[in-house]
Amino acid sequence: MHFIPETLDNYVVAHSEDEPKLLQQLTRETYQKILQPRMLSGHYQGRVLSIISKLVNPKNVLEIGTYTGYSALCLVEGMQTSGQLHTIDINEELVDFQRKYFDKSAYGNQIIQHLGNALEIIPKLDKTFDLIFIDADKENYPNYFKVIIDKLKPGGIILSDNVLWSGKVLEDLKPDDMDTKALIEYNKLLKDDPRIETVILPIRDGLTISRKRNS
């Protein structure tokens, strides 16, 4: 969804950082071979993720929802040379596709893939994280927050994608629309939790930045 006129949106993209060639290749192949290619973060949002990561300069990054690996490759751009990115996805069919592009990048040996249910995997990760990106099944966003908050270092950042959900968060809630219900709950949870401070950026489908307070 566009929050500004498309011509102005195009200007914003044109005057932002160029998309790396590897990510251009990944985008083309995703659109050629993979279902629901609109799930890609894409050029502009990818550069937003990249520059936030560079500002944070994280040692350890956690990503919930890998898809074809685009956002992971953006997030590792700001990671410390000794750091690791742990990315979790439930779709077994995409593992080899992700790994191909991870290994084409300069960060292949720093990206650790996890296959399965993130709510089961995260508690078993013996790490704390400086940067966490949530872009998976919307119904579980509140549950993801509950399992990651204690693994986020003080001063660490949570990025949450699709928090405006094509504007559905403003519409009358349908009884069977569990995704929108969960996102409304999640947005309120982030706003009200005293452990974090939060702003929503109205770019693409809504991106929230939440920072864990130091005390």
Image: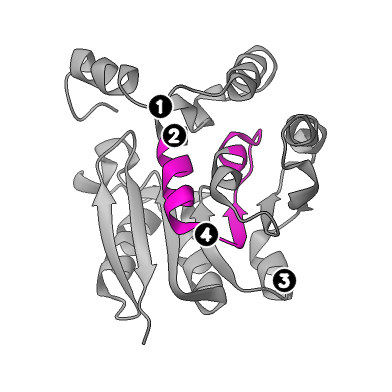
**Segment tinted magenta in the rendering:** 47-73
Circle 2 — which element? Answer: helix
Estimate the x, y position of residue 164 in percent, counting from the top left.
30, 44
Q: Nearer the viewer, mark 1 or mark 4?
A: 1
Q: Is residue 172 visible?
A: no
Q: Residue 47: which numbered mark, if any?
A: 2
Disc 1 target residue: 17
Residue that carries the numbered disc 3 in the rendered image: 125
From the viewer's perspective, is 172 left or right of 161?
A: left
Quadrant showing the N terminus: top left
Percent of width and height locating residue 96: 82, 34
Callout in the foreground (1, 2): 1
**Which quadrant of the rendered structure holds the C terminus?**
bottom left
Report the coloring of the rendering: one colour
**Which residue type does callout 3 highlight?**
Leu
Front residue of 199/123: it is 199
Question: Residue 174: x percent and y percent?
Answer: 31, 47
Measured Cα–Cα span from mark 1 to mark 2 = 7 Å
Q: Residue at x 66, y 33 (%)?
A: 68
Q: Amino acid at mark 4?
A: Ile
Whether pointer 4 and pointer 2 mark residues with C-beta atoms closer than 8 Å, the reply is: no
